[in-house]
Image: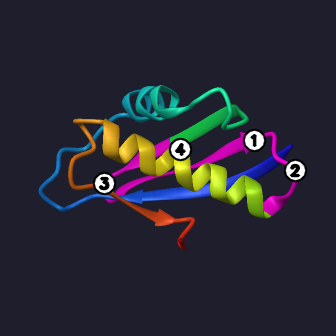
Amino acid sequence: MHLVEFAFAKPPQAPELSSDVLLTELWAACGPDDGVEHVRVHASRAGARGVVFLLAPDEASAVRRCRAVCRRALTLSSVLGGWWLARPAGA
């Protein structure tokens, strides 16, 4: 199991969201092949930060899976409009 940190940033004019709302949006974006076992998230005025525990063959795969789940949540969620993935960065 791997632990991967992530962070979302939000536009200044976007409303603040609770950690519970963010957690719901992240779980909604998880698929059966993502390997997500547990998610923790903390909301802030600037966005959110959190960690995902994933089953993956190696750390690089875990980071890619975390990035995919986070990007999927940003794409699918209407409440995360304008938010972006600040970490993990990359392709």
Q: Which region of the structure is painted magenta?
A: 42-59
How far apart are the two marked residues, 4 and 3, measured between alpha carbons? Answer: 22 Å
**Quick one: label 4 or label 3, which is nearer the N terminus?**
3
Q: Is residue 50 magenta?
A: yes
CB within 8 Å, label 1 to label 3: no
**Quick one: label 3 or label 2, which is nearer the N terminus?**
3
Kind of residue indicated by mark 3: Arg
Residue at 69% x, 32% y is 38
The mark found on residue 57 in the picture is 2
Depth check, front residue: 61 or 17: 61
Depth check, front residue: 17 or 35: 35
In x, y percent, where is residue 61? Answer: 75, 57
Colour pattern: rainbow
Q: Is residue 1 above or below residue 83?
A: above
Q: Is residue 45 above or below residue 89?
A: above
Position of residue 33 in the picture relative to residue 27 (left or right):
right
In x, y percent, where is residue 63? Answer: 68, 59
Identify the residue under disc 3: 45
Q: Nearer the viewer, mark 1 or mark 3?
A: 1
The quadrant the N terminus occupies is top right
How far apart are the two marked residues, 1 and 2, measured between alpha carbons? Answer: 10 Å
